[in-house]
Image (cartoon, helix red, strand yellow):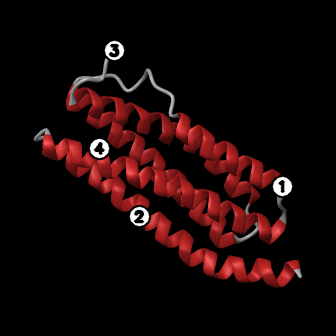
Amino acid sequence: MSVDTVEKLFVDELKDLYSAENQITKALPKMAKAATSSELRTAFETHFKETEGQIKRLDRVFEILGKTSSGKTCKGMRGLLEEGAEVMGDTEGEVRDAAMISAAQRVEHYEMAGYGTVRTYAELLGQNEIANLLQQTLDEEGETNKKLTQIASKVNKHAHRHAA
């Protein structure tokens, strides 16, 4: 199918985000298990629950549009998660926590860019209910990113002190 209209681009990018969120639900439990910081572990577990809610929101978006969510694999997210898994394997202890925060923030920024774009398309297309659903997810992703930054300020110092 040729993506030759904003409407088709909108649906294509929504499918990409749907794939990304489903990939994230597979990675977050592994990250939570690998975290040595209890605060980081809790943040990953909390975001896992949020991600499940974000998938449900996307299900609602596809329902409103009368479209299917399947048919696309988000290669960008796959690459980000592969890099995250690689860094988890190459690090240990508190340094692993710092590396996982870095990887998780890359994921959050990727998601924020995607959700901001599709929210704008929804507004352009007069899909106000969808725009509101997408904004809710965008807000959650931003809050998760802020939380990771707060945790990083402690984890990074701890990792630096104990690595010397």
The mark closer to the camera, 3 or 2, is 3
Mark 2: amino acid: Gly
Query: Which mark is drawn over residue 142?
Result: 2
Q: Looking at the picture, how far across and down is residue 35, in whole percent?
A: 73, 62
How far is mark 3 from mark 4, CA to CA?
19 Å
Nearest to N terminus: mark 4 or mark 1: 1
Describe the element under mark 4 as helix, strand or loop.
helix
**Is 62 positioned to the left or the right of 40 in the image?**
left
First in residue order: circle 3 vs circle 4: 3
How far apart are labels 3 and 2 at the CA level? Answer: 33 Å
Which numbered disc covers residue 1? 3
Label 4, residues with CA under 10 Å away: few <14, some 14-19, many ≥20: many
Give the foreground label among 3 and 4: 3
Mark 4 / mark 2, whichever is N-terminal:
4
Q: Which residue is mark 4?
A: 118
Q: What residue type is disc 1 on?
A: Asp
Say whether residue 49 is left or right of residue 163: left
Q: What's the distance in space between the residues labelled 4 and 1, CA to CA?
A: 35 Å
* Location of residue 149 with respect to 131 vertically, above or below: below
The answer to the question of whether label 1 and label 2 lie on touching residues, with beta carbons closer than 8 A, is no
* Disc 4 from disc 2: Cα separation: 15 Å
Query: Tag on residue 90?
Result: 1
Classify 10 Å Cα crowding around label 2: few (below 14), some (14-19), many (20 and above): some
Q: Residue at x 76, y 54 (%)?
A: 87
> Please, what secondary structure does the residue beneath circle 3 have?
loop
